[in-house]
Structure formats: structure tokens, C-alpha cells
Image: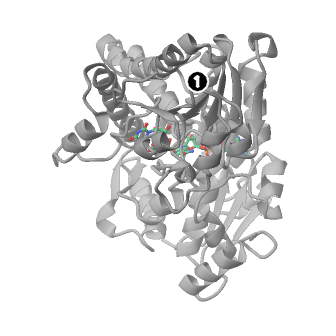
Amino acid sequence: EEAITKICCIGAGYVGATTSAVIAYKNPSVDVVVVDSCEAQIHAWNSGNFPIYEPGLKDILSVVARSGSSGGDVRGEKKARKASTSSIGNLVFSSNIEHAVQNAQLIFVCVDTPTKTRGTGSGFATDLRSVEASVNRIMDLSTTSKIIVEKSTVPCGTAAGLRELLARSNGKGVKHEILSNPEFLAEGSAIRDLLHPDRVIIGCEDTIAGKQATARLASLYKAWVPENCIISLNLWSSELAKLAANALLAQRISSINSLSAICEAVGADIHEVGRVCGLDRRIGPEMLRPSIGFGGSCFEKDIRSLVYLAEGLGLRSVAAYWMSVLDLNEYQKHRQTSRIVDFLHPAACDRVAILGFSFKKDTGDIRGTPALALVRDFADRGFQINIYDPRAKIGSIQEMLDRELPLSSRHKPTAIFSSASEACDQVHAIVIATAWDQFRTNSKETTLDWTSIACHMQEPKVLFDCCNVVKAGYLEGLGMKVVELGRRRALL
Ligand code: NAD
Ligand code: UDX
């Protein structure tokens, strides 16, 4: 079988852009064209004013993106050049979907698959319209056979359904093959995750053509991923493994968060409990960080998809089990605001700053951010809220607040600031909602002037650290009171 030299990626979002960049970087002889139905998205990638922030992405794009669309900063460019010695220029962001699809041998489908908001399964089932539109477009445009790679996260059975759809093109002298190749990258560490994946999984139909297509896709990954990490499996397993992995990761967070409530009540320390549990090799240390709840665009939607699947199969107890992971997550978000309000109300305090609005550090993405629950709860209780985030765009935060929190529901103003010191000025309390290194009291990355912040706060000057990023003793030395998630502390 001839090697793949021409790839198209449909969807220039978080997954499409980062995955394409790394595949292009590691396969200099392969041409990659990333397309998107949203012209503004393509324009943003080509303008150098990238639509997403992801550490290390600029460096890689400065090597692979054809000139004019690099946008790399000088320092980053130098670093990346050193690694690759010269610019490759084998990746393009383009609005010409027709040409990219027709020209490609292999097409990644990396479009969004949100939870349905209407119709059957609303609130649980996956909205597959973007995937179906992409596949229909491929069928309409293609005059040669393609390998279509389902990279978007989809419910089990999607590939089987698409295969039937694709079979309709077979009469036109083409035979498309469909593979499932879900993506496991996490935002904020996407480039590192893509460069060093724990595993790459490729699901295929159990036919000779399916195996051949798998081998051709695998050869792209073999450029940098050890062969024993590339796992071939059946389509259903591959699709379910993606949902299962996210559900298991989220379940660990709900587990540790449930224990954080016990810690606060009895005087145990969740960080000590988590650390010693994680030292058991069978448990392991990752994804046991307590938080105000997990957020992002994946965990909740993928668990909802799993719950819907289980319900549809009549597996009530299974559905209820996974639903409880989401229930605990909601509980944790509201539990923290109640705890904070309980501290503040007796002192008649009503001005609070929220530091960190992205759903996790090192990303500007606010989709599914747990910080929104804090804002909503504080607004309900009549607080004036100031928000600051180092990366999330002020416009996107504003748009989310306007959509989710109508002005009529806000008794006091909610404002977004471009610096932490402005957001914290004259507030009674600060809540750290995202674990940005900038907020740490003992990190080189710290950009906050805690002395000045403490000086410009109003009594009782409380800091609620929901992310374990401050040294309580240090801030107490500056006259602040510190309350930490998962630790009991007498105060006020
Ligand atoms: P995204 O919303 O950032 O990007 C999707 C892009 O697809 C958008 O730019 C949109 O305009 C484009 N698009 C939609 N329909 C299209 C069409 N018919 N033709 C051309 N372009 C179209 O989404 P994302 O975060 O990159 O996620 C994509 C998929 O990957 C989802 O299924 C998600 O569950 C999965 N995933 C995401 C992550 C993550 O961390 N974000 C990780 C693993 C898997
Ligand atoms: C997740 C999966 O990790 C990734 O494999 C999958 O491909 C997409 O979904 P992502 O949502 O980008 O990635 O980030 P992740 O690091 O998993 O964090 C998700 C949420 O969980 C964040 O809100 C984060 O703050 C929270 N979290 C994470 C915790 O509360 N505690 C932890 O220990 C880890």
C-alpha cells in the first residue's frame, strides 16, 4: 500500500490544530491541510493571533506552518529551529475545504461533538451533526477512496453507522474506509501529550481493507511513537475506550473531592490523604488533586454520553453509577461557595475577587469552567464580583456571563479585569479558582504582588485557596486570613 503523503484535517479547534501540527512536525514529507467551516478560525490561525493558547504550540507551528501562518515569537522560533534545524512548511490552514478533501488520501475528522440540547436524548446524547456534515461533505466531494479517521469523541457505534452511510458512495467507484482514532490529549499539556502519548489507539473493521488502512495510519504515528504503544482494536472498543478513560479520570476527581468534604469536617488534610493514597502503585498519584470540581469541554459531556448509552441498554445501575460522578461534581462546586459564604456573611462582606476563570491552568479555554458556578452562587447571594484570569479572553468571559447569568439575576455588578491587582482592589475576599502558577506564593512564575494586594483589601481580608497554590503562613504574615479547600482552619 502506498504511504500517506497528503492529509486533510477537518476542524481547526483544540484537537485538530494541535494534532495536525505535531503530525506535520514529525512527518516532514507529509502535507497537512487543516480546514474549518468557520472562516474566522482559519483567518485567526493565519494571522498569527492564534485562536487558542497552548504551551509549545507556537514553537511547533513556527516550524511546520507555511510562512505567513507561523506567528511564532522569536525566542520560540529559535528553540524550535534548533530542534528541527530548518523550517518545514508542510502545514497549511485553509478555507478551501473542497480542494483539501479532494486532494487528501487520509482525512481526520476533528469537529465538535457537544451534548444535544434538544430532541431525543437532550442533555445526555451526543450531537453528531458536525461529524455527519463532515462525512457527507467528504462523500460529496471525493472522487478517490479515502481513509476517514474519526478523531472526535463519539458514542459507540458511530463508526459502524458512518460505514453504512459511506457504503452509498461505493457505487461511484470509490471505497472509503473508516477508522476510530480517539485523542487523549489534555489542554494545557496538549503538545507534551501528543509528543509522548501513553498510547495511540486505532479501531478498525475486521477486514483486510480495515487492517491495511490501520497500517497506513499507524505508519504516520510510528514516526515518533514506539510501536508497542500503537494499539489496534475493534471499532466499538476504540470508541468506548475513549469514553471509559475520561469517565475513570473524572471519577477519581469526584472521589478525592468527596473526601475533601470529610477532611474539612474532621481536620484531616486532603493533600496528605491524597498523597499517601497515590503512593500505592495500584492507585497512582495522577488526577487526585482536589478542586472546586472538574470542568472543561470533555469530562461532563463524555460521562453524559456514557450514561445515555447505559440507559439505552437498560443498564440502570450502571447509568446511575456514572451519573453519581457528575452529581458529586455539582455538589463540590456549590459546597465550596456555601463554605465561603458561611465565612463571609456574618461579617457582612459582599465584595469578592475570583482569580482564575479558565477551567484549568495553562489554557484560556473557559468551556465548562467550574468558576462559573462560583460566580452564579455569589451573584445569587448578592455579592459584587471581580474576575481576573491570565489567559481567558475578557470578551469570552463576558459573553459567557451574559449568556449564563442574565443581568436581571445580578444584584451587584460583575466586572472582569485585566490585572489581578485591579480585581482585588477593595474586596473583602479573594477566591483562587484556577491553579495558575502566577498565583503561587512560592513560584518563579509568580506575578502577583501579594503585599500590595493584602494592603488594598478590605477587612477581613480572606483568601480562599481552592487550588492549593498559596503558603498560608506567608499570606497570614501580610495580614490576610487563609481558608483552604480540603483543610480545616479556624478563623474569623
Ligand atoms: P473545537 O470546538 O475547539 O473545534 C472544532 C472545530 O470544528 C471548530 O473550529 C468548528 O468550526 C469546526 N467544525 C465543526 N463542524 C464542521 C464542519 N462540518 N466542517 C468543518 N469544520 C467544522 O473542538 P475540540 O475541543 O477541538 O474537540 C473536537 C473533538 O475532539 C470533540 O469530539 C472532543 O470531544 C474531542 N476531544 C477534545 C479534547 C480537548 O481537550 N479539547 C481532547 C480529546 C478529544
Ligand atoms: C481531559 C482528559 O484528561 C484528556 O485525556 C481527554 O483527552 C480530554 O479530557 P482536559 O479536560 O483538557 O482533558 O483536562 P484535565 O487535565 O483532564 O482536567 C479536566 C478538569 O479536571 C479540570 O477542570 C481540572 O482542573 C480538573 N482536575 C484535574 C482536578 O480537579 N483534579 C485533578 O487531579 C486533575
Residue at coordinates 74% horizontally, 44% vertically from top-left?
Answer: 393
Residue at coordinates 60% horizontally, 35% vertically from top-left?
Answer: 113
Q: Please say if 280 is above or below 304.
A: below
Of residues 477 and 450, the one nearer the viewer is 477
Of residues 253 and 51, the one nearer the viewer is 253
Q: Is residue 199 visible?
A: yes
Q: On the image, which quarter does residue 403 sit in?
A: top right
User: What amino acid is labelled 1 in the image?
Assistant: Leu
Q: Is residue 135 visible?
A: no
Provide residue 323's location: percent of width, then percent of height. Answer: 40, 18
Residue at coordinates 43% horizontally, 22% vertically from top-left?
Answer: 332
Q: Identify the secondary structure beneath mark 1.
A: helix
Residue at coordinates 76% horizontally, 69% vertically from top-left?
Answer: 71
Q: On the image, which quarter does residue 358 sit in?
A: top right
> Which residue carries the number 1 mark?
374
Few, some or many C-alpha atoms within 10 Å of disc 1 (few <14, some 14-19, many ≥20)?
many
Provide residue 193's location: percent of width, then percent of height. Answer: 45, 58
